[in-house]
Image (cartoon, grey):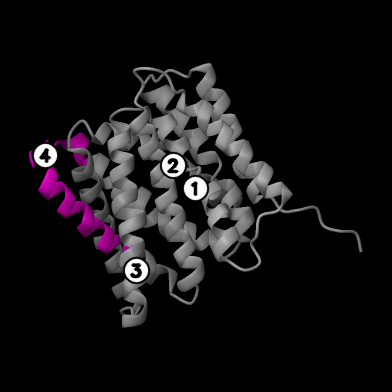
């Protein structure tokens, strides 16, 4: 199971580089739309093969809302941010999601109130965000805030899942929310972007990797891991994703690693780890 978790982190971390490269051949949201439409087609094929029924009318509204939050808005924010800040920093801001989810859960989910450990972790993560954003005159502050908002949208979707969708089939949820989210991305792209895609062997590879590997298969892999591990232990493995994103951006895109950004990355990861780690068991 540890090997599968590491594989998932490698896929999602490296995919930030693929998305940045894909933006050179497609408009940012156009690329996201093509990516998730590709993933959706594969997932619907899996649903048909598994003979999973369609969602009922009581759950479909939550699928639509989650699709808008964690697929449509989440990816619009990421794709636009990647044009103005580097792939590594974008991955760090995006994977700050557990910090925001912990605050929401404190007020909305019984039994998940903040304690001293979680509060220290959140404070550490927020401090790390300030360092990682490297605020200065002439910087792309708005793009960094957009990256942070993607984490908040992801957290809201996860909150809905915990409150409203615990009973749902995970494959069914992943497929339908991705379908609605992909349609939202397509609509946004058609309205606000030029449709002049530059199809080539390289650009088709970018779409195929992001759609099939990093979307459809990776989310199914994540569901498989979650069903066989404690949620807290599984989520801790995701802390590797922004690290892999930073290293991949440095290796493949020759992106610089500033001292302030490195310090911010460390603090964000430390904060997320503190929030998600299990408390020390009491002696019997």
Q: Which of marks 4 and 1 is nearer the N terminus?
A: 1
Q: Nearer the viewer, residue 89 or 254?
A: 89
- The reply to whether dot 3 and dot 1 touch (C-beta < 8 Å) is no
Residue depth check, mark 4 versus mark 1: number of the one nearer the observer: 1
On the image, numbered disc 1 is attached to which residue?
97
Q: How crowded is mark 1: few (under 14 residues within 10 Å), some or many (20 or more)?
A: many
On the image, numbered disc 2 is attached to which residue?
94
What whole-number distance in Å separates the C-alpha atoms at marks 3 and 2?
21 Å
Query: In the orientation shown, which residue stands out farthest toward the right?
Result: 284
Is residue 99 magenta-colored? no
Is residue 188 magenta-colored? yes
What whole-number distance in Å separates the C-alpha atoms at marks 3 and 1?
20 Å
Magenta-tinted stretch: 177-204
What whole-number distance in Å separates the C-alpha atoms at marks 4 and 2?
26 Å
**Relative vertical location of residue 39 with respect to residue 166 in this rendering, above or below:** above
On the image, numbered disc 3 is attached to which residue?
63
Q: Which of marks 4 and 3 is nearer the N terminus?
A: 3
- The reply to whether dot 1 and dot 2 touch (C-beta < 8 Å) is yes
What secondary structure is marked by label 3? helix
């Amino acid at each position: 199971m540890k090997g599968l978790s590491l594989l998932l982190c490698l896929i999602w971390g490296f995919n930030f580089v693929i998305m940045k490269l894909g933006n050179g051949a497609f408009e940012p949201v156009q690329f996201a739309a093509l990516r998730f439409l590709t993933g959706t087609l594969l997932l619907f094929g899996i649903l048909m093969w598994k003979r999973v029924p369609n969602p009922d009318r009581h759950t479909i509204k939550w699928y639509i809302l989650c699709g808008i939050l964690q697929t449509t808005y989440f990816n619009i924010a990421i794709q636009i941010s990647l044009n103005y800040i580097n792939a590594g920093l974008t991955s760090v801001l995006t994977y700050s999601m557990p910090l925001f989810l912990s605050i929401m859960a404190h007020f909305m989910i019984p039994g998940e109130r903040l304690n001293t450990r979680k509060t220290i972790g959140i404070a550490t993560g927020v401090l790390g965000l300030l360092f990682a954003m490297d605020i200065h005159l002439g910087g792309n502050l708005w793009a960094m805030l957009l990256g942070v908002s993607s984490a908040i949208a992801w957290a809201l979707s996860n909150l809905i899942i915990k409150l409203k969708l615990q009973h749902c089939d995970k494959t069914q949820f992943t497929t339908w929310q991705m379908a609605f989210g992909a349609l939202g991305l397509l609509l946004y792209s058609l309205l606000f972007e030029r449709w002049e895609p530059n199809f080539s062997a390289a650009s088709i590879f970018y779409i195929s990797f992001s759609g099939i590997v990093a979307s459809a298969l990776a989310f199914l892999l994540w569901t498989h891991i979650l069903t066989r591990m404690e949620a807290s232990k599984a989520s801790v493995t995701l802390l590797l994703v922004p690290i892999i994103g930073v290293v991949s951006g440095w290796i493949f895109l020759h992106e610089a690693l500033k001292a302030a950004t490195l310090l911010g990355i460390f603090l964000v990861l430390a904060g997320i780890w503190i929030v998600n780690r299990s408390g020390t068991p009491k002696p019997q």
